[in-house]
Image (cartoon, rainbow, N blue to C red):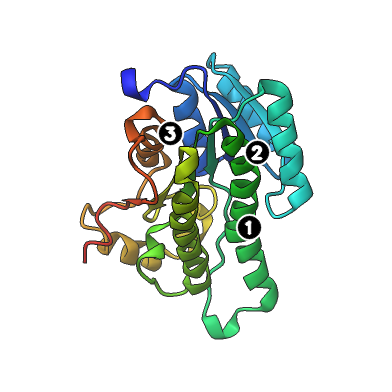
Amino acid sequence: MGFFDLTGKVAIITGGNRGIGFAIARGLATAGASVVLANRTADEGRKAAGSLKAEGLQAMAVQTDVSEKSSVSNLVKNVIDEFNQIDILVNSAGVIQRGPVEDFTEEQWDHIININLKGLFLCCQMFGQEMIKRKKGKIINISSNVSEIIQPGRVVYAVSKAGVSHLTRGLALEWAKYNINVNAIGPGPTITELNKKYFEENPDDLQERIDSIPMARVGDPLDHVGAAIFLASDASNYVTGQTLLVDGGSTIW
């Protein structure tokens, strides 16, 4: 596999129990990494890790709430105790709520920002501290194509993801001297457990999303695996501060 070989690497994937996070975790494990799935529900994490181990891949799960500093600190401790190293962090944990801005409650705002942005910052900060000690590391933040554009009913979510992409650039600038690459992936509309029910109940919205994509389809979690392996591997050693849009061309126009 050469440049894309992750043998001997340890990768932490928040939100790794399902959707894009799980697809990326499986991809990194298939490329040789030992993966740690971090998510809020212990049973779901163990089940996801078990399915990877059943394929002969190296995986473990640690129950984590990324919006709580003490929980993230516990995740870091678990990884260090188990592997004594941290090579790759994928911040995939995220939530979305849709609705008119004028109707959004403070609680809804806090829920989205606390997980999508604050939680991602806490993970970057704490795992980054460990990477700084080793003078190397790869951080991949899952942003969105709506970090670049706005879609109806998704303004607060878009704000959180714009923050993710800008934080990615800031960390890349500050941590380049430590040989830490910080990049993001910006998925276009992708059908996952997070949004499947919504799109089933709102087929007109789904069709609008499809109509806005030059490749005329929404994404699948597997569509984002190649970008993640690239950004986690030596193939991207001179790439930092970028948001790689994997969106079927939806931001072209």
In the picture, the quarter occupied by the C terminus is: bottom left
Mark pair 1, 2: CA separation: 13 Å
Residue lying furthest front: 177
Mark pair 1, 3: CA separation: 23 Å
Residue beneath label 3, please? 232
**At 34% from the left edge and 42% from the top edge, which residue is drawn?**
239
Residue lying furthest bottom: 102
Mark pair 3, 2: CA separation: 18 Å
Q: Would residue 23 appear left or right of 41 to someone viewing this image?
A: left
Q: Position of residue 83 (x, y in %)?
A: 66, 22
Q: Position of residue 85 (x, y in %)?
A: 62, 26
**At 59% from the left edge and 43% from the top edge, which residue is drawn?**
128
Query: Foreground residue, 12 or 122?
Result: 122
Query: Foreground residue, 163 or 41?
Result: 163
In the picture, the quarter occupied by the N terminus is: top left
Task: Give the secondary structure at mark 3.
Answer: helix
Q: Amino acid at mark 1?
A: Ile
**At 52% from the left edge and 56% from the top edge, which residue is drawn?**
197
Residue beneath label 2, please? 38
User: What is the total number of numbered labels drawn onto the structure image?
Assistant: 3
Task: Give the secondary structure at mark 2.
Answer: strand
Label 2 crowd bin: few (<14), some (14–19), many (20+), radius 10 Å: many
Q: Amino acid at mark 2?
A: Ala
Residue 139: tell me if it is visible.
no
Check contact, mark 1 vs mark 2: CB within 8 A: no
Q: Which numbered dot is residue 115? A: 1
Residue 185: tell me if it is visible.
yes
